[in-house]
Image: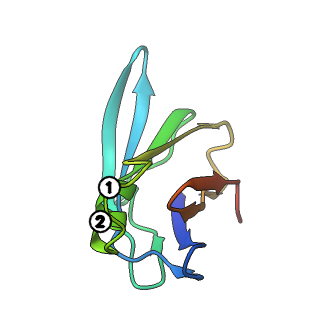
C-alpha cells in the first residue's frame, strides 16, 4: 500500500484538495497508476485503487501550485513537488508525507 498525507506548515493544518499522481517507473518511462485528491484531513489512501504493489521505483507528484493559488497565495514558488522512492518489500506499507509551505517542503517515510 502507498499512501500520503500533506500538511501545510504555514497555517498549521492539513492541506485538503491537493491533487496527487502516483507513477511507476518502467525502464526509462513513467506510467501513471493512481491519482487522487487529499481529503479534509490532508490524507490520500486510495492511490493504489486495489492494485497490488510491486517492487520498483515510484514517484508521487503533488500539484502544490493549484493548492497555493486556492489559498490566495499568488504565484507559487514551487508549482509542483515530486518525490521519488523505491519499493523493495511488497508486504510493507509505504506512507510518504509531505510537509509544505510556500517557500519550502520536506518529506520522510512515515508509518
Residue 82 picture location, percent across and down: 48, 42
Give left or right: position of 7 versus 111: left
Q: Residue at 34% across / 75% down in the picture?
A: 71
Rendered image quadrant of residue 19: bottom left
Say which residue label 1 marks: 75
Rendered image quadrant of residue 99: bottom right
Q: Residue at 70% across / 62% down in the picture?
A: 110
Residue 102 picture location, percent across and down: 50, 61
Neighbours of disc 2 within 10 Å: few (<14), some (14-19), many (20+): few
Q: Residue at 54% across / 68% down in the picture?
A: 5
Give left or right: position of 26 versus 32: right
Disc 1 from disc 2: Cα separation: 7 Å
Q: Are marks 1 and 2 in contact (CB under 8 Å)?
A: yes
* Between 16 and 103, the one nearer to me in the picture: 103
Q: Residue at 37% across / 59% down in the picture?
A: 50
| Nearest to viewer (mark 1 / mark 2) | 1
* Between 27 and 90, the one nearer to me in the picture: 27
Rendered image quadrant of residue 94: bottom right
Residue 91 picture location, percent across and down: 65, 51
Give left or right: position of 35 versus 98: left
Q: Tell me the colour scheme of the image.
A: rainbow
* Between 23 and 6, the one nearer to me in the picture: 6
Say which residue label 2 marks: 69
State the mark number for residue 87: none
Is 16 situated above or below 5?
A: below
Q: Earlier in the sequence, mark 1 or mark 2?
A: 2
Is 48 situated above or below 26?
A: below
Label 1 SS: loop
Give left or right: position of 71 versus 6: left
Label 2 SS: helix
Amino acid at each position: 500500500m502507498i499512501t500520503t498525507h500533506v500538511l501545510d506548515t504555514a497555517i498549521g493544518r492539513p492541506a485538503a484538495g491537493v491533487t496527487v499522481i502516483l507513477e511507476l517507473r518502467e525502464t526509462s518511462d513513467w506510467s501513471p497508476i493512481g491519482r487522487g485528491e487529499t481529503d479534509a484531513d490532508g490524507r490520500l489512501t486510495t492511490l493504489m485503487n486495489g492494485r497490488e504493489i510491486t517492487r520498483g521505483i515510484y514517484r508521487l507528484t503533488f500539484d502544490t501550485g493549484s493548492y497555493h493559488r486556492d489559498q490566495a497565495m499568488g504565484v507559487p514558488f514551487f508549482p509542483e513537488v515530486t518525490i521519488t522512492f523505491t519499493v523493495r518489500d511488497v508486504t510493507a506499507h509505504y506512507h510518504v508525507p509531505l510537509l509544505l509551505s510556500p517557500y519550502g517542503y520536506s518529506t520522510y517515510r512515515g508509518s
